[in-house]
Structure formats: C-alpha cells, structure tokens
Image (cartoon, rainbow, N blue to C red):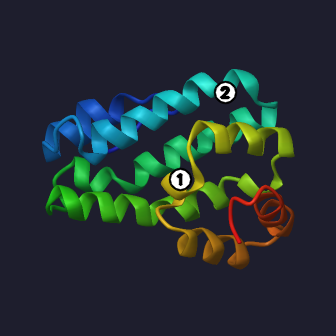
Amino acid sequence: TCSNPKPNSCAFYDDCLEDECQCGADGYPIGYGLHYCEEFTDAKSQMSDAGKDWVAETMLCLQNELVPWATGSRTGSCTQLKEYAFGTHPECYVNSGLCTLPPTDWIVVVQTVGLQELFGSWGALKASLQAAQGCGKFLAFLVERSIVE
C-alpha cells in the first residue's frame, strides 16, 4: 500500500507517488525516483552483501520519507516535492550505512548516480558526511577521485 512501501520494490514511485502527484515523465517520481530505484536494483549484482543491504535499506528509507506526499497528507507543487525529496537523500544514504561500505561498493554507487544527483548539492553531501560518525574514509575517497574538494 502507499502508506507502507514494500522493501526491494520500486513500484511505490509509479503506483503511489506519481499517481497522487502527477508530475509527468520528467518529474521526481518517474524521472528521478523510479529511474534511480531501478538503476540501483540493477547495480546490486555488482555489490557486496553489505552493499545489497544498503541499497534495500536506502530504497525503503527514501520511499518511507515520501509516504505523506503519496497519500495526499502533504501536498505541494512538483518542484516542492523534488526539493523535499532531495532533502531526504543525505540522511537516508548515510543512516543506511553508506560510509561503512567497502570502497568497491562506493565505486558502484558513484557510477550508478553522480554524487551531485545523489545528494542534490555538494553542501548537503559534505554536511551529512561531516555530521555522521565514521564517514572520514568515504569523504577521503571522494576527494582522492576529485569528486569533491
């Protein structure tokens, strides 16, 4: 149901969020949420067991954060939805264990979606990594690869 997204499923974005918000093919539900949910589902095969768990937890976290929009208890424009959704990304990624994944999984994450897409902005990314315990190695990984400064 739309108030309780299913783990390891991307259906929420189309069946619930887009159904309620009507943002079209380029809007957040279809153009971003569904698109990257499917990309990460495909990328799981290249990840460690911890990486696979991280994808599942992150997908569910992101969808749960959007339940109020999908059920109509929170409303706004498609732009407001996108801004809200991007605001939930850093916390979901970090709290689901991004920083403790092996570097091989970080490479898959970065290849699957650019980090600016992932977090919405460098500022949001840095703030989240600096606030989280144990994210120093991930931040160093990004700096080493000139992904962030």
Query: What quarter of the picture does the C terminus occupy?
Result: bottom right
Task: Say which of 51 and 60 sits in front.
Answer: 51
Q: Quadrant of residue 110?
A: top right
Residue 135 in percent (x, y) is at 79, 67
Residue 76 in percent (x, y) is at 14, 63
**In the image, is 4 to the left or to the right of 142?**
left
Task: Say which of 113 and 148 sits in front.
Answer: 148
Residue beneath the point at 32% across and 51% down: 67
Q: Against 70, is 83 above or below? A: below
Residue sitting at the far front: 146
**In the image, is 80 to the left or to the right of 66?**
left
Q: Which residue is mark 1?
A: 118
Q: Against 66, is 121 above or below? A: below
Name the residue type under label 1.
Leu
**In the image, is 18 to the left or to the right of 112?**
left
Q: Which residue is mark 2?
A: 44
Q: Which mark is residue 46?
A: none
Front disc: 1 or 2: 1
> Residues under labels 1 and 2: Cα distance?
16 Å
Give the SS element for disc 1: helix
How many numbered dots are placed on residues in this image?
Answer: 2
CB within 8 Å, label 1 to label 2:
no
Q: Against 14, is 21 above or below? A: below
